[in-house]
Image: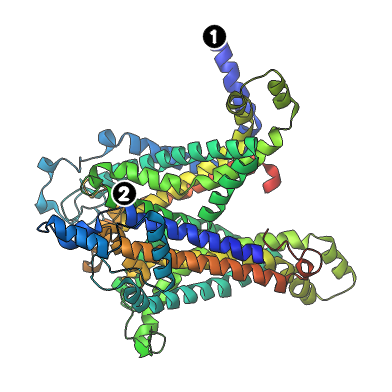
Amino acid sequence: MIRRLLQAIVVMLVVAFVAFSLFQYVGDPVQLMMGQFATPADRIRLTHELGLDQPFYVQFFHFVVNALHGQFGVSLRIGKPVSVLLAQRLPATLELSICAALLALAVGIPAGVYAGLRPNSWLARTAMSASLVGVSLPTFLIGILLILVFAVKLGWLPAFGRGDVVHLGGWSTGLLTRTGLESLIMPTITLGLFQLTLIMRLVRSEMLEVLRADYIKFARARGLSDRAVNFGHALRNTLVPVITITGLQLGSIIAFSIITEQVFQWPGMGLLFVQAVSYADIPVMAAYLCLIALVFVVINLIVDLLYFVVDPRLRVDRPGAAGH
Amino acid sequence: MAGRLADALRDSWDSDLAWSFRHSPYAMVAAIVFIACVGTAALAPWVAPHNPFDLARLDLSNSLKPPMWIAGGDPSYPLGTDDQGRDILSTIFFGARISLEVGIAAVLFSMGLGVALGLLAGYVGGKTDAFIMRVADVQLSFPAILIALLIDGVARAVFPGAHDSMAFWVLVLSIGVSGWVQYARTVRGSTMVEKNKEYVQAARLFGIHPLAIMVRHVLPNVLGPVLVIATIHIATAIITEATLSFLGVGVPATEPSLGTLIRIGNDFMFSGEWWVTLFPGLALVIMVLAINLLGDWLRDALNPRLR
């Protein structure tokens, strides 16, 4: 476990280094901040004030210390501190991502179990064919089609934005108002659909695999009920890979929310990031990168911990082997 | 000579792969659709009913015409026109061409990079192997789209102004770099198996240079799975390109790919001109679905155990 933790810290340092190099080699902040009418003396003064005349490793150290304090400088495009911008938009992205993940799990696992238990029923076959189409549909196109049908043609749901939000302390939530919930429906489906198909296909193939195992045959021979065999033994053993993939997918849900947020003009971090990329707004890009990396690393650690909970074998004979 | 060619043809027709192809209706339909897509895309300047990029031919009085089966439609514009009076069907042909070009170029780039690094890691082993695979692990924990976005953003900041003219290559680079890991992992795995076989040991005893052994002896034996990955990767690369273009960081609007067309059309959806975005979207899905089906079939045909 300690090895995993060390590895996580190394990954974070590498990402911080990439983010730092962005600052270092891309654009000239002094030029950007002073404009074209600055004297050489002004330039030297500002360079010194910003600490840009110090050696590389000192600057990198300052960058990491600042990053640990959540300081990533000021957005070149909006002119506000990046930390403030991200904090404002974090709730929107998190609410959307968590709802999408819940949708994917709540529908994907039962559908996968069903398709695994009755692989030849027409419902399972239809679901599998539909899932191949689902994999081939780009996220943004799903969003556009939903908007076209439910917002433009039928007028049932709002096409963009978050609706009314309620501010609770520093957290703005759309879960407590009617318009907020209505606005959440289509982005959630858009973001969750791909993960849903992925989880369904995974659970199905794992179920098919496990149901062939000897201990399942033995459990049936013992006269256990179908219910006990299917859910108590089979489903339980499919959960390890499902937890891994789901955990890793939660990270990509947050990353893929970039696209969904763009389609629905959802005021989250992803929208901020896309705007930052097209304006080459480095501080925002660097901060978003570090934040996403942190999310990924934390999720990876949690997934490893969950292994111990779900799979008792790891606790007994291979205590050090959690990091595959 | 002709007899030998016919023999070769008959042999390949009787091979396992062809047998499985002839017995898989999905694969045959997918192949026909894919060939049709590639054909129309490659021949776009000749088969498209209009040239959507010839500014002299565009007429704003033709703008936003609906498809021909809807009242107000014009049979010479079968799928309608966009805001600048460009024929949607023709822009789809040209757009598919750019999407395919970017997709295939990016896959070739990924494949080259991934196969080279995988071969190196698997054959040399030791510290080189550990380093390459660690980098792969770290990159694999980030979604490809994020890495592609990042590279594109950096390219924008490094070459301001010149970006539009290089957009194509920046896209190929960003999609290509974001996809090499899968190739490297697969090739590394099979290289580690191959390098202990007799023919490699024999080559080593002859004193052949390790680089030559890698390229001439090991490489041909590890390429099978790479082809499967590459096929499915073309679909992914096309989706990634469309997504980047949709986000506005892909190819410039003067040379629209399918993703760009969808983004442009998206602005007109609310005023009721749904055809501007729907048809390019359908074209994209059909193309990607065909490639995915082909890839699935190829995987099953080459490796029955995976089924």
Instruction: Tell me the residue at 20%/54% (across/down).
Output: B82
Residue type, label 1? Met
The local secondary structure at tag 1 comes to loop
Q: In the depicted view, which residue is nearer to us: B85 or A30?
A: A30
Give the image location of residue B234, x and y in percent: 46, 44
Instruction: Tell me the residue at 26%/73% (across/down).
Output: A80
Residue type, label 2? Ala
Q: Tell me the quadrant of the picture where the N terminus of chain A can be found.
A: bottom right
Q: Is residue B2 above or below residue B122?
A: above
Q: Quadrant of residue B186?
A: top right
The local secondary structure at tag 2 comes to helix
Earlier in the chain: of badge 2 and badge 1, it is 1
Instruction: Return the residue found at the far top.
Output: B1
Instruction: Tell me the residue at 32%/64% (across/down).
Output: A283
User: Badge 1, how many Cα within 10 Å: few under 14, some, many 20+?
Assistant: few
Residue B163 visible (yes or no):
yes
Q: In the depicted view, which residue is nearer to us: B132 or A46?
A: A46
Residue that badge 2 annotates: B155
Of marks 2 and 1, the one in the foreground: 2
In the displayed structure image, the side of residue B127 where residue B82 appears, left or right:
left
In the displayed structure image, the side of residue A114 where residue B285 appears, left or right:
left
Q: In the depicted view, which residue is nearer to us: A255 or B38?
A: A255
Q: CA distance from mark 2 to mark 1?
A: 52 Å
Judging from the image, mark 1 belongs to the subunit labelled B
Give the image location of residue A70, x and y in percent: 40, 73
Residue A203 visible (yes or no):
no
Residue that badge 1 annotates: B1
